[in-house]
C-alpha cells in the first residue's frame, strides 16, 4: 500500500502543513459558531497518497460521517483535499462540548 505513488519531499509535506493551518484559520473566521475539524491520515514514509490510501481515507470518512448522522449531530463538509501530500477533509459542526 505504501510502495506505489509519488514520493514527497519533507519540504512539500511542511508546505502542506502550512496550507492546512491557513485553511483552518480561514474556516474559523468564516464559521465562528462552528467547531472546525480537520481530518487527515498520518502516513509513514515518503509516499502519502495513491489509490489504495485514497480508498482507505474515503472509507474512514464515510463511516465517520455516518456515525455523526446516526447520532443526529449536524455536520457540514466544507472542503476536501486530494493532494500528493495526502487526503484531508475539513468539516464544521454546531455541536459544542
Image (cartoon, grey):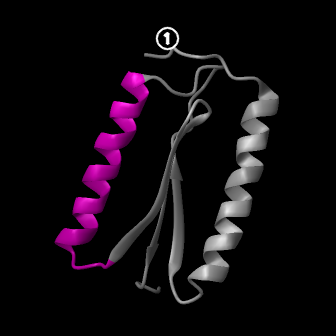
Decide: is 80 above or below 45: below
Decide: is 6 above or below 56: above
Q: Residues within 10 Å of mark 1 (few under 14, many from 20)?
A: few
Check the picture and name the quadrant holding the N terminus: top left
Q: Does residue 3 appear to the left or right of 55 in the view shown? A: right
Decide: is 26 above or below 53: below
Residue at position x 75%, y 32% in the image: 12
The percent position of residue 5, horizontal first and vertical second, equals 53, 15
Q: Main secondary structure of the magenta part?
A: helix
Residue at position x 24%, y 63% in the image: 67
- SS of the residue under disc 1: loop
Depth check: 43 or 5 in front?
5
The percent position of residue 55, horizontal first and vertical second, equals 33, 32
Instruction: Kindly give the residue lying farthest to the top in the view shown.
Output: 3
The residue that disc 1 covers is 4
Residue at position x 17%, y 70% in the image: 70
The percent position of residue 31, horizontal first and vertical second, equals 56, 82
Write the start and end of the magenta stretch as one range: 51-74
Task: Report if residue 52 lies within the magenta region.
Answer: yes
Task: Report if residue 65 lies within the magenta region.
Answer: yes
Number of labelled discs? 1
Q: Does residue 84 appear to the left or right of 76 in the view shown? A: right
Amino acid at each position: 500500500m505504501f510502495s506505489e505513488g509519488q514520493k514527497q519531499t519533507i519540504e512539500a509535506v511542511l508546505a502542506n502543513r502550512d496550507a492546512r493551518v491557513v485553511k483552518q484559520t480561514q474556516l474559523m473566521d468564516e464559521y465562528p459558531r462552528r467547531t472546525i475539524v480537520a481530518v487527515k491520515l498520518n502516513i509513514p514514509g515518503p509516499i502519502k497518497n495513491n489509490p489504495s490510501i485514497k480508498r482507505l481515507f474515503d472509507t474512514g470518512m464515510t463511516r465517520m460521517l455516518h456515525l455523526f448522522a446516526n447520532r443526529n449531530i449536524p455536520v457540514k463538509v466544507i472542503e476536501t483535499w486530494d493532494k500528493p501530500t495526502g487526503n484531508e477533509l475539513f468539516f464544521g459542526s454546531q455541536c459544542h462540548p
